[in-house]
Image (cartoon, helix red, strand yellow):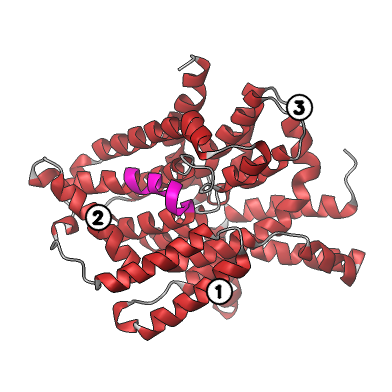
Amino acid sequence: MSPTTIQLIGATLFALAIVHTFSVKYFERLAHRYPAHAGSFHFLGEVEAVFGFWALVFVAFKFSITGKAATVDYLEGRNFTEPMFVFVIMVIAASKPIVDLAGFVVRALTRATPVKARAKPQVFYFLVLALVPLLGSFITEPAAMTLAALLLRDHFMSKNVSTKFKYATVGVLFVNISIGGTLTAYAAPPVLMVAQTWQWTTSFMLAEFGWRAALAVAVNAIAITLFFARELRHLEYHASEGTRIETPWTIVFVSLLFLAGVVVFAHYDSVFMGIFLFFLGFATAYGKYQERLVLREALMVGFFLAGLVVLGAQQAWWLQPLLTKMSPDAVYFGATALTAITDNAAITYLASLVPNLSDEFKYMVVAGAVTGGGLTVIANAPNPAGYSILKGNFPDGAIGAGGLLVAALPPTLVAVFTFWVMRALGI
């Protein structure tokens, strides 16, 4: 490996961005200590701003070294469709008609479950952490993350629950979303990066990944529900609310059409951005059936992912050779670990550029990438959306990176068992 000056700068700034991600609480403390500069420190204390900020620093370095033309060419050569898509799908999925529908469906399933009334909160909680992540295989992972995070925030993240419960919930949510999108070939970002190149169809995904993912999702959701059963039992039970949905069904239906249109045209930014503009007009015209759209939160998430695109492209010089030197089993654990400090879609994309990989290697690199997708905020594209929605319910208004890592380890080990151990045993 003989990296250029720009590549070395990119790798260094990428490392600094990772350290910054784990240090956002420090900047929040600085904001309180130096009120004259509180605005700047609050900005640096936003996890969603981290990679965007360091991407800007990288662009400034590149501009000073290579000039305007080369810098513009580099940015024009990056694909920002995913950040744009996550921004759009997050706003639409978090709109009141869609959230009302999701809550209505989960409440209806909860009421239909033949258990005692005092166990209903546990059933509701289980369904949010099991059913909604698997739904991500059809409405895409970012949309599933948005819906699940909103349901958890509104029903289970009150001041009456422990911080331990909150971290455990986010850990399971992030892991289940990462693996829950693998039942199809179009919903999970790391699968999208390889599906066309390797000719992976939805039937292939369901046979090789989907059932393993569904098993892990169910085990994780059951385990955390049982572990916190006593704490859940004392929560106010919103799932027992009326059987009627507040929003008129015509508004819900049109909102679903907008959501479906964005999902179908997820690869075509000019199309889904047009659909989004029509949605904004619709939401404005029927504002009485809407609440505040999460435009700011979605923009910050898009900013985060765009920064990851800019900086992530500079890591291929060391990441791709590292992956290709591993055996299939080693690449599984390597991809799981590397995903935590990069992005699982970046891992699989770099692997897709290597010719003549074995089928076993292909499986292991994708399985490892989705397994590690819940360990950090940057590990999976939907994670910043969930972070943005839920962070206000945590102490100091932030989800600690160390706490998230520890909380995500148990459900990650469950995914290791279903994706690697069971396969090694021939199951």
Q: Which residues are magenta?
A: 130-141
Q: Residue at x 32, y 55 (%)?
A: 152
The disc, 3 or 1, on the residue closer to the chain's N-terminal end is 1
The disc, 2 or 3, on the residue closer to the chain's N-terminal end is 2
Q: Amino acid at mark 1?
A: Gly
- Judged by depth in the image, the label closer to the viewer, 2 or 1, is 1
Q: Does residue 19 appear left or right of residue 280 in this picture?
A: right
**Which quarter of the picture shows residue 318?**
top right
Residue where numbered disc 3 is placed: 325
Q: Which mark is residue 274?
A: 1
Residue where numbered disc 2 is placed: 105
Q: Are marks 2 and 3 in contact (CB under 8 Å)?
A: no
Q: Amino acid at mark 2?
A: Val
Q: Quadrant of the N terminus?
A: top right
**Residue 146 seen in render:** yes
Confirm whether the magenta stretch covers residue 120.
Answer: no
**Residue 160 seen in render:** no
Asked whether 348 or 31 is in front, the reply is: 348
